[in-house]
Amino acid sequence: MKTSIKNSSCTLPKRSSGFTLIELMVTIAVLAIIVSIAAPNISNQLANQRVKSTTATLHNTLKEARVESVIRRQAITVSYNNAGSPKSIIIKDADGQSIASYNYDDKSIIKSKDGSNIIFYSNKTANEKTYIICDSNTAASPRQISVSKLGNITNQIAGSCL
């Protein structure tokens, strides 16, 4: 007695390929947890990068002004403008003519206790000044640029943004 497979009353259940709704929901929940853990770290990294970028811009501008004062044999003034958009750092000669202007990120803030101007003199000296660079995200590490009376410019992680 031979029976064919086609005529057999026992059939295998059909398998569907794909994901169930529960599997998709669990995957999405796990991804949401990972993103909620990683998002603050990414935000802090971006804020620190903005501070580093603004610090580099200010540091290079101060170096350029120091060199220009010696080359032109006149006092060169550097000032910054935190108001408006875009924020800028400006180099001016003794006559008040703009030599160069550099923009920095709108979320960055440059602070100085005694005004925004610093003057580099042709005898390689300068007004002593300390700048603090901060970000609108208070979790970012502030940086400090110091200019000595001899015109030496130093850059370090320091300062307070409060």
Image (spheres, rainbow, N blue to C red):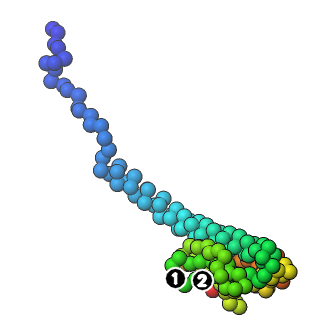
The 10 Å Cα crowd at callout 2, few under 14, some 14 to 19, many 20 or more, is some
Distance Cα–Cα, label 1 vs label 2: 8 Å
Observer-nearest of 50 and 25 = 50
Could you tell me which secondary element the residue under label 1 belongs to?
loop
User: In which quadrant will I find the C terminus?
Assistant: bottom right
Instruction: Identify the residue at the far bottom of this view.
Output: 114
The reply to whether dot 1 and dot 2 touch (C-beta < 8 Å) is yes
Q: Quadrant of residue 6?
A: top left
Residue depicted at x 76% and y 74%: 68
Locate residue 105, reporting x and y percent. Answer: 56, 73
Query: Is 160 placed left or right of 105 in the picture?
Result: right
Q: Can residue 137 be seen in this snapshot?
A: no
Locate residue 74, reporting x and y percent. Answer: 78, 82
Residue depicted at x 50% and y 64%: 39
Could you tell me which secondary element the residue under label 2 belongs to?
strand
Mark 1 lies on residue: 84
Observer-nearest of 157 and 72 = 72
Mark 2 lies on residue: 81
